[in-house]
Amino acid sequence: MASIKDVAAEAGVSVATVSRVLNGHPSVSAAARARVLGAVEALGYRPNAVARSLRTDQTRTLGLVISDVLNPYFTELARSVEEEARALGYSVIIGNADERPDLQDHHVTTLLDRRIDGLLVSPTDGGSPRMLEAARAGTPMVFVDRWIPGVDVPVVRSDGRAAVRDLVAHLHGLGHRRLAIIAGPAATTTGRERVDAFREALGAHGLPLPDAYIGQGDFQADSGRRVTEGFLDLPEPPEVVFAADNLMALGALDAVRARGLRVPRDIALAAFDDIRWFVHTDPPVTAIAQPTGELGRAAVRALVDRIEGRGGASVTLPARLVVRRSCGEPPASSPQSPSPSPVRRSTT
């Protein structure tokens, strides 16, 4: 492997001149710059990233710890994070916490040991000791999707409350009155927030949310299946099941089909977190879509701003309702009134 000395010899300049060219220093003549870049190309020279990081105290690397890499929402989020980081000259190392605080702490410790410049985290189960310690020690950090109240870290997230209101208004307009929810873990901010938003939206229409219609899930398909089976066994099953994430919605769909029932003829289904799979189910699933790509890009920009001393502010983006056929068709005699906030409709 060629060294910086080899490049200097090939170009007929000093090692210091090669270093200035590689670091973009303006005090190098155009002719010398051209010779250095030509030598770099001819020799296939690649700067030593470890040596550079020791010299500059930066690795140009970000850490991303996500809650569940198998969840399509987090997969898409990670992709947008990596794309934006690359565009800004950073690399990304990803750790999957698998909804386990101990794994989250393991990844945080490993990433910090690798001298990352900053950390993006979607906290699992209300946080974990090592992550909280890093945040309070001033490690450049941004929470994405989820957050921990009381911890002074910028948060990049979506606000689904308006979209949940739109969903309940849509369901109410279809004549549904018994609405149930498969909740996410109460220890997570998203788990609590979606139940609160659903309850508030029902209350605006004078509809109750009985305890029997709140099923505790864990953002995994098996819990969606289990909770839906419990709903179907009730003396008065709900007319609608709203799953607070996409995987629990898929589990709910499995439970309905296992009983020989059909969506939406026998029970309607809606979900938080729209995913591409939902257009391929039968019927396609009505869902609340988060601006996942925008969230990932905004989170990277906020973190880089924090790393480079420009602050880094919290960002909240709106979610939206995507209406498909899993909740039924509007009555022909009573068309729906327009929603108070933008709603994207699909003909699938």
Image (cartoon, grey):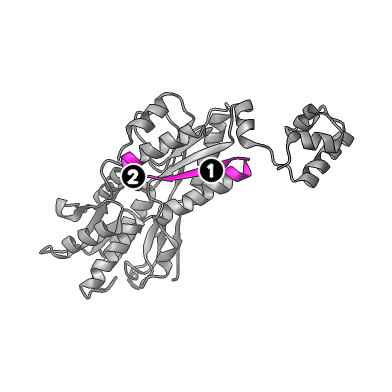
In this rendering, the answer to whether 19 lies above or below 282 is above
- Can residue 178 be seen at all in this image of the molecule? no
Which residue is at 38% across, 59% downward?
287
- Can residue 319 be seen at all in this image of the molecule? yes
- Quadrant for the C terminus in the image: bottom left
Report whether 284 appears left or right of 198. Answer: right
Q: CA distance from mark 2 to mark 1?
A: 25 Å
Viewer-side residue, 145 vs 100: 100
Which residue lies under the disc numbered 1?
92
Which residue is at 28% across, 60% downward?
172
Q: Range of the magenta residues?
A: 85-103
Q: Secondary structure at mark 1?
A: strand
- Quadrant for the N terminus in the image: top right
Viewer-side residue, 268 vs 24: 24
In this rendering, the answer to whether 330 lies above or below 50 is below
Q: Pointer 2: residues within 10 angstroms few (<14), some, or many (20+)?
A: many
Query: Whole-percent x and y of residue 242?
Result: 28, 58
Check the image and name the residue furthest to the bottom. Answer: 260
| Residue 88 on the magenta segment | yes
Which residue is at 34% across, 58% downward?
247
